Image (tube, rainbow, N blue to C red):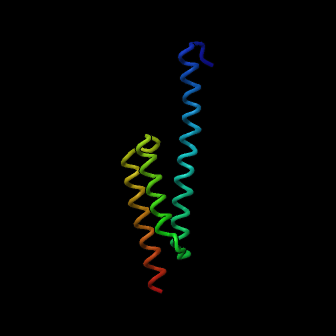
Amino acid sequence: MANIKSQIKRDRQNKLRHERNKAVRSELKTRTKGALRAAETGAEDMGERLRLAVKRIDKAAAKGVIHSNQAARRKSRLVRHFADIVEESSGE
């Protein structure tokens, strides 16, 4: 445990940020899975779910939770995977 006042405060701030960032990253995964699952089932709102997932990724990058390059990579993979699933289901 730190003895210096400023370090005690810094530890407290880091703990809060860690919890908040963890929640944001968890939501990113949830939204991504939801978008992919909607594409697989052919849900009516699959486009909307994809839009919300991309929006959350952008927001996390803007807030500094994830790096901007990681956000770009995640969006690229998500959209590509989404398109593959939609193409498979419509081709059958």
Residue, far right: 1
Task: Give the residue at x 55% y 68%.
Answer: 37
Residue, far top: 4
Task: Give the residue at x 46% y 68%.
Answer: 47
Res. 54 image quadrant: bottom left
Res. 86 image quadrant: bottom left
Does residue 69 appear left or right of residue 43 in this picture?
left
Task: Give the residue at x 41% y 58%.
Answer: 75
Rendered view: 66 above or below 28: above
Rendered view: 48 above or below 44: above
Image position, residue 4 (x, y; %):
56, 13
Residue, far bottom: 92
Rendered view: 35 above or below 84: above
Image position, residue 38 (x, y; %):
54, 70
Image quadrant containing the N terminus: top right
Res. 2 image quadrant: top right
Q: Nearer the viewer, residue 37 or 62?
A: 62
Rendered view: 23 above or below 46: above
Q: How many numbered marks have been drawn onto this rendered protein structure? A: 0
Image position, residue 56 (x, y; %):
47, 52
Task: Give the residue at x 60% y 13%.
Answer: 3
Image position, residue 90 (x, y; %):
46, 82
